[in-house]
Amino acid sequence: MDKYIVKGKANIKGTVSVNGAKNAGLPILAATLLAEGKYEITNVPNLTDIRTMAKLLNNIGAEIEWGDGKIKIKTNGCKNHEAPYELVKTMRASIYVLGPLVARKGEARVSFPGGCALGARPIDLHLKGLRKLGANIELKHGYIYATANRLKGTGIYFEKKSVGATANILMASVLAEGETKIQNAACEPEIAALAEFLVRMGADIKGIGTETLIIKGKEKLHSADASLIPDRIETGTLLLSAAITRGSITVEDCNPDHLGIVLDKLEEAGFQISTTENSISLNSKGPKHPIEITTNPYPGFPTDLQPQFCSLLSTIEGDSSILETIFSDRFIYTTELQRLGANLKLNENELIIKGGAKLSGAPVMASDIRAGASLVVASLYAEGKTEISRIYHLDRGHDKLEEKLQKLGADIKRVK
């Protein structure tokens, strides 16, 4: 099992590019099940989760070719309708095949999903939405069994915003008979990217990027190509890696519009930010200030960047706070940051950060993707050597993170 060895007190500076977004790629790959044909998806990061989704599609019957940031998919032979436990247990996003399979094949057998341990993450919104579209759902032996002659359009209101449920119901509804109206839909850029891909496949979708999606179902769709949007979470992680070391960085091939509130919070903390259409530059000159953060669905502050921000705020004098409203167990990473010397006080879903701590290297362990990223960010600042184990979590969301940081001046290496 690999781990990172990081020697701290780095000065992160330079220019770096980001990969395509995993969270856009996973539903887009699943959407290829909606129509027979040949697909080419580019700007694809080489991540464990992407490889798992490719294996899942192959298990269903798709032919997969992968190389040099590109996946070619042929879906003509997809006769299987099962997503087995062996694949689904490692990745929650495997649930994305449920909607496309029942919409196109009329049946699906999908194991309950796994993935990061972030507290209760029920799939009830997925199932309620499919039932409203006319699917018959049975839960038995750890599997979801869904059948339908043909789904029928309807009105669906999500009680709470859910990226996963919005993606699944959107994919199912493009082949449903009649019109479907999804209200309180997730507005994340990754959902908009999925919707735009479905439109290229022939779907009729209005309201892309808003809370209300109106879909007029089609008898059939056709294949299309896609290039994945930039990964906004990787972009933020790289910016924070420079910020914590008081360095300077330019992140290229990104979309600053996807990180509005994140850039606002960096400026509020005293960092200088400048942007172009596809780049973000951060400069660390000037005094730094504690801030308050509340996570919320997009365009609010992303929960996937709050652990990395916690690392940064631990080094800024004064009391900062993070209020987490998305995942009940998101703060599981704090015990490992405390091993590095962070002064943190957790009160239910609010974290108080006593800033100005002198972090020092120690053996620590990643519990999920973003927790691992927070430890990497903190280790760049900490005095001495930090050993980060279980970095297979990081490999699910970051492609060659250590190589990018090395080029920016970090002393970080991957060892067995």
Image (tube, grey):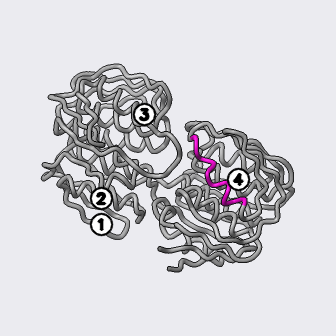
* Residue nearest the viewer, comparing 96 with 329: 329
Q: Is residue 333 above or below residue 110?
A: below
Q: Is residue 169 left or right of residue 220?
A: right
Viewer-proximal residue, 116 or 275? 116
Q: Residue beneath label 2, please?
A: 54
Sequence-first disc among 3 and 2: 2
Q: Secondary structure at mark 4?
A: helix
Nearest to viewer (mark 1 / mark 3): 1
If you read the primary sequence from the N terminus, does the residue marked by circle 1 or circle 4 appear first? 1
From the top left corner, tell me how far across and down residue 291 is, in percent: 78, 45
- Looking at the picture, which amino acid does disc 4 mark? Cys
Say if mark 2 contacts mark 4, CB within 8 Å: no
- Quickly name the residue at label 4: 310
| Callout 2 secondary element | helix
Stretch in magenta: 328-338
Q: Which residue lies at the image location 76% right of the left edge and 70% below the top edge?
A: 360
Give the residue type that dot 1 points to.
Trp
Using residue 122 as the reference point, say whether residue 221 is left or right of it.
left
Which numbered disc flags the more N-terminal residue, 1 or 2?
Answer: 2
Tags 1 and 2 touching, CB below 8 Å: yes
Amino acid identity at mark 2: Ala
Q: Nearer the viewer, residue 196 or 296?
A: 296
User: For the residues carrying marks 1 and 2, which lies nearer the camera in this image?
Assistant: 2
Residue 66 numbered tag: 1
Q: Which residue is mark 3?
A: 208
What residue is at 56 percent from the left and 38 percent from the top? Answer: 298
Residue at horizontal 31 percent and vertical 56 percent from the top: 87
Residue 222 is marked as none
Q: Main secondary structure of the magenta part?
A: helix
- The Cα atoms of the two marked residues, 1 and 2, are separated by 9 Å
